[in-house]
Amino acid sequence: MSAGPALSPRARRQTAIPGFGLAFGITLFWLSAIVLVPLLALLLRPFELGLDGLWASLAEPRVAASLRLSFGAALLAAALAAPLGLLLAWAVVRLRFPGRAVLDAAIDLPFALPTAVAGLALTALLAPNGWLGAPLAAWFGWQVAFTPAGIVVALLFVALPFTARTVEPVLRDLGREAEEAAATLGASRLQTLRRVVLPALAPALLTGFGLGFARAVGEYGSVIFIAGNMPMVSEIAPLLITIRLEQFDYAGAAAIGLAMLLLAFGVLLLLNLAQRALRRGLA
Amino acid sequence: MNATEDPRWFRALLALLAILTGLLLLALPLAAVFAEALRRGWDVARAAILEPDTLAAIRMTLIVAAISVPLNTVGGLAAAWCIAKHDFPGKRLLLVLVELPLSVSPVIAGLVFVLVFGLQGWLGPWLQARGIQVIFALPGLVLATLFVTFPFVARTVLPLMQDQGRAEEEAAATLGASGWQIFQRVTLPNIRWALLAGVLLCNARAMGEFGAVSVVSGHIRGQTNTMPLHVEILYNEYQFAGAAAVAALLALLGLVTLVAKSVLERLSGRRVSGAEGAPMRMLTVVSGGLLLPFVQV
Amino acid sequence: MRSPIRSGRRALLAAPALLALPARAQRPRELLNVSYDPTREFYRDYNAAFARDWQAQHQQPVRVNTSHGGSGRQARAVIDGLAADVVTLALAYDVDAIAERGLIARDWIARLPQNSAPYTSTIVFLTRKGNPKGLRDWPDLVRPGIAIITPNPKTSGGARWNYLAAWAAAQRHGQDPEAFLAQLFRQVPVLDTGARGATTTFVQRNQGDVLLAWENEAHLALQEFGAERFEIVYPPLSILAEPSVAMVDANVERRGTRDLAEAYLRGLYAPAGQEAAATHFYRPRDPALLAKNARRFPTLDLVTVDGAFGGWAAAQRTHFSEGGVFDRIYRPGR
């Protein structure tokens, strides 16, 4: 697929910097060995079922429900992560308070913490006898762990650094000039925030949303402990992949994997179009 | 008060909310791990970590990281150098492919290697006939880890390389330097701190990966278990304190990574985050980019 | 006194020894037993005993490695190339699946005595102490407000035994078994992928009123978490669970471990193996030993898969395959 345009670059390359061939060779070899060939298996294997079989395998109500759950929960988690990420980024960039540096470093924690550890920790916290789960159950009668809500919390945890870290540099670069200009023109603070700051941050927020979503939708390690794993209710698509594998249904497992990949790209494509429209609106 | 300043109370409220979010979502889970680990006392935690199977898991994790991180560093640097310092058709596509593993579920990452190297897969029977074990052995663990951590180094150094432009490299080329000399003497020194931070993140993820290695590990005690997998095993053997102790060790590793990264950021005067990369570009690349090369080029 | 050969070897091994185990005079022969979830404790003991006996008889050190997980997942791993010398799984179907791929001889079940199941077990109820909901028999489970913990039959061997026991009991009580199971699974709040995960959910996370568990798993939970917190309830009727063991012919051939694997499995039927099984709450096949432990293993009415379901292949096809009864239970709109 990539071979056509990519293989004859030497003749057409324009820069004067030497050494391209070797670096490109390493890159291409590396990429093919680690990523492309294995993914090719994922692309081809489902078609062993034939088109009808592939379709039947994906039209299973359990598969449909798990895909709905995975994508719904990931979208919701990313949607929650966007304002929270904005809040964290704003606090780190614009505010001065004790503990700011710690908070700044802590934002990357979900990134550095192994997902299984995060899953165990969140489950212990939110289980009906956990530090947070017990009061939530006693005061509000809410149960978070072992329900779809628990899945959203786990996904929020993994998606949060993506939104925060995407907005942060933009906020830093934004500077105060535009806001000051708006103020000189007599805008109120609220107007300034709504008309100047938010539009400038919107593309980054959307990007962060997309990245957080992409990360969350395939998440397995942190979700599996907290989900409850009920078919049709709290069974995520990656879990269904492993379940199919355990039933020796390789093609069926690969089919769900392929569907997830395509759907994720569909969502990202839509976001990309939205972002373009947003930019055009701004220009 | 003017239109560029928020009222004091509002700023205080925001700071409070931010701290609360940080505490609830970030600090509390971490605290839970350490509390659980030390609940039965320091000695139990220490004993759990010094147990031979745990030590074997730690050793396995270190070996896997020691193999996969350098390999991905070389691959990532090569890819970033190609993209930042050279022009070639299909560049966008390359960028997409480099970042592709980020949006692939870890379970799928494990699955693809089963599909290729498993006994029911493409190469499995051929490999077994020659006595080569790939999945359920070290090579499989390394491959799955390589896949998952593939984009990290490239993503952390690429934005910096792009910002720095090509003037220095081109000057060196005019003076007759070879490609390797230019890379080693000009590009590398400019990105060294970012590179180190990227390697750290790559390492943290390599040691902490669960989903992908779980599919290809085989879970043989003392042999093909990595630390995250061993956490699950201990947990399943009702050794909750032991599981939490190993988890705490992993969490500690994450914390050290964060601190080291902060120090490196100070040194390089630039923020490096695995979650950031080149934010504005990323989305365009992942989504539109995947389709565009087929349409445009 | 150390022989010169040995110390020379030691020097050679000094560098890698930093990473490896301490150098030994003779490299131990290795055997890999791929097993299911609740056998961890049993095989830890049996492996040590086996290694000791083999060393005594053959002057050869042996190390038995184990891998545990959901029975289906473990069978899948062996099919995908996990180099197991022996498999000791939760049910015959999973061994059949491996045999179907040609890794185990088709007639494996007849190669060892008693359906190649050296120990048996059954399915019991584990309730909170004092059995506060008064659960005595299967129909009690589907009373309103009872939360049941059981793993997913698609992934867990134990869960399949749970399911079939419930099915047989419903039939015995003259109820429509499919409706009974649909109701039962409607009352399951957490569906773990393995038996061990389900136990943890019930015991540690405090979910549910009753855990459907292997008899041995229930006893182990009492032992680990205290008999003052939980109680084992024997329903009048349950199922005879026969966890199967088999040698993986393709792998022992390749690795040259047939003698070791053979002795390992035969040893499970020998007095020491039977004793270890009984210690870990598996019902031994040896009638004398079973009689000696009669207080531990009360007699109850046990149906068999062959008798009630026409064998594992049929049971699997009807109930657990894609689109089978279990999938129907989880169809929306029911």
Image: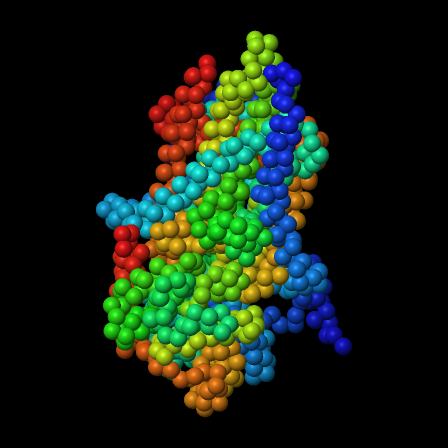
Up the image or down, C84 lies above or below A177; here it is below
Give the total number of marks visible in the rendering.
Answer: 0
Vertical order, B196 against C165 (above or below): above
State the residue at coordinates (48%, 83%). Answer: C296
Q: Quadrant of the C terminus of chain C?
A: bottom left
Residue positioned 50% across, 56% down in the render: B217
**Residue C119 can be seen in this image:** yes
Question: Which residue ends up furthest to the top in the rendered image?
Answer: A185
Residue A196 in view (yes/no): no
Question: Which residue is more in the foreground, A41 or A127?
Answer: A127
Give the image quarter of residue B182: top right
Q: Please tell me which residue lies in front, B277 or B296.
A: B277
Tell me where residue A216 appears, x and y as whole percent: 47, 41
Q: Position of residue C7 (x, y in %)?
A: 72, 69
Q: Outermost residue toward the left?
A: A52
Q: Position of residue B110 (x, y in %)?
A: 45, 50
Q: Is residue A122 above or below residue B52?
A: above
Residue at the extreme right: C1
Q: Where the N terminus of chain C falls, by quadrant?
A: bottom right
Q: Position of residue B69 (x, y in %)?
A: 59, 44
Q: Residue at x 59, y 48 (%)?
A: B29
Left or right: C308 with respect to A122? left
Q: How is the image coloured?
A: rainbow
Q: Residue at x 29, y 49 (%)?
A: A61
